[in-house]
Image (cartoon, rainbow, N blue to C red):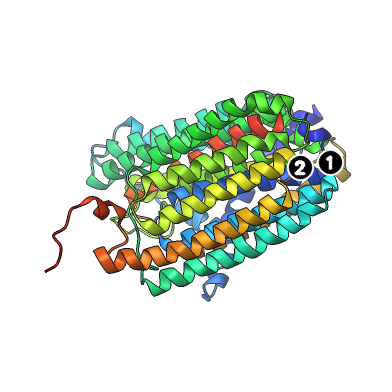
Amino acid sequence: MTAWLLAALQTLLFLFMAPLLAGWVKRVKCHMQNRSAPSLFQPYRDMAKLFRKHTVLAEHASWVFRTTPYIVFGATILTAAVVPLVAVQLPTTAIADVIVLVGFLALARFFTALAGMDIGTAFGGMGASREMMIGALAEPVMLMTVFTMAMTASTTNLSEAVLFTLNSGLVLRPSFVFAILGLMMVAVAETGRVPVDNPATHLELTMIHEAMILEYSGRHLALIEWAAQIKLMIYAVLIANIFLPWGIAAEFTTEALGVGAVAITVKLMGLAIVLVVWETVMAKMRLFRAPQFLGFAFLLSLLGMLTHVILETGG
Amino acid sequence: MELAQLSLFNQAVLVLAALALLTSFLMLAQGRKLPLIYTYGWQGVLLAVTTALVAYVTGHTHLYISAALTLALKALLIPWLLHRLAVRLNVQRENEPIAYPSLLLLAGAALVVFSYYVSLPIVQFAASATRNIIAVSMSIVLLGMLLMITRRRAMAQVIGFMSMENGLFFAGVVSTYGMPMIVELGIAFDVLVAAILFGVFFFQMRASIDSLDVDRLNRLREVDE
């Protein structure tokens, strides 16, 4: 019972901390670029504002357009429930493994793309086709990094994998070095960050995610943006907890949970700084260079698998 | 041998070897000259550190000399020479387009699988603790060859050649803890001489065909009257 309660609490924590992470990223980025930064809680205010506003629907919008925000948000919450944030071995993590997690994210993407095409504007269709191109290239990379992790831990269940890395202590694994780099590149592409997409602008020639959701307003837009923030947090937590799991709570005592919460906060803050430095140093890529970027990510994950076979199991 | 049973230093050797392999792939994907030279330099640094670590783990003190030689020649002197050549030939900003970059990287990955397959029998009979790395060093050799085959500019081909030599040296270190010192010194100075000769060759090439594109060497040209 306590375990289920904790699992529900952890998912809620995921939901309500995601805007804070987004705010932190924005704040660090502003400091990095010598601009004055908005408050950490600005994403919450934006969201509250959007929830209060009316939604404007296009005349020819079908049920796909109206239900998509709920489907996307629902799929993202389910994904968040599967990822161990503060503690491992929660009952929700036993429901699904990483492959299902990739599937949930693909479902959300599929419906966003459908909704983009549903209202029939040029931008929606363009954004949808771009998003599907990037998705088709990014998903294999994601799965390959997951398999690299699964080959080492002999499981695709996230909680078990985290526990495995936690219990084996400090082992330098060449395959993990490649897998973490590959996963970071995929995370950047999937969450629409700088070299592939720019979340801060509505520049018509370059936008991908923004182009698909251009017609959304009010609470629909709030839900979709919230889902995007949760997605960013999901990827950050995956990177932090699979490859650097130290500090995560293995038992359900108050002390262990407290340590786990502090550890994940520190890790996420650190990862956000890495992301901001990366975004500040990199320039936005031309869309047709994105396959090359993701091709390199695929190579990294493939090398991770190969080095696992060559260097880590060798006869 | 399972990875978790090795000592932390042995694991570090494996990680550095894997990173050296990664630099080979980075060179394969890099079209610009100066980053290519720097990546080659970093591969030299990684090799030197790996060699020093192998020397520390196995207690073969003569490997420290090899590590120092590698650091001095392959990580500092040769990249510096190449950098100076690139600046003097005014090709440092040149960006060579790479045909089919994704296909090239996949071909590289296939070469890694191939060298793993080929080195399996050697690995089973080798006694050294670093025997798993033999496949990695072989793939560095093959990737250097792939770099030479796929590029048309002489500078990139020379770097491919040098990185092949890196792979050979690495194979020597990890399979038999280094070659006899006299052989190693000989090869090191051969490479240095080769780098200087290539420089002369670059200038000759540019003087005669006004380009560093080796494909142009195929064309017949009327002798100037």
Residue B47 x/y as whole percent: 66, 52
Badge number at residue B11? 2
The residue at 24%/50% (across/down) is B218
The amino acid marked with disc number 2 is: Gln
The residue at 73%/25% (across/down) is B125
Work out how far the residue at label 2 is from the one at label 1, CA to CA, in angstroms: 6 Å
Instruction: Report whether mark 2 lies on the same chain as mark 1.
Output: yes
The residue at 84%/41% (across/down) is B7
Under circle 2, the secondary element is helix
Residue B153 x/y as whole percent: 35, 56
**Residue under numbered circle 1:** B7
Name of the residue lying farthest toward the left: B225
Q: Residues within 10 Å of mark 1 (few under 14, many from 20)?
A: few
Q: How many marks?
A: 2
Badge number at residue A3? none
Q: Residues within 10 Å of mark 2 (few under 14, many from 20)?
A: many
Q: Is there any visible trace of residue A265 in the rendered image?
A: no
Image quarter in which the N terminus of chain B is found: top right
Task: Using residue A289 as the reference point, say whether residue A172 is left or right of it.
Answer: right
The amino acid marked with disc number 1 is: Ser
Q: Is there any visible trace of residue A56 in the rendered image?
A: yes
Badge 2 vs badge 1, beta-carbon distance below 8 Å: yes
Residue A290 x/y as whole percent: 39, 47
Task: Using residue A105 as the reference point, say whether residue A173 is left or right of it.
Answer: right
Image quarter in which the C terminus of chain B is found: bottom left
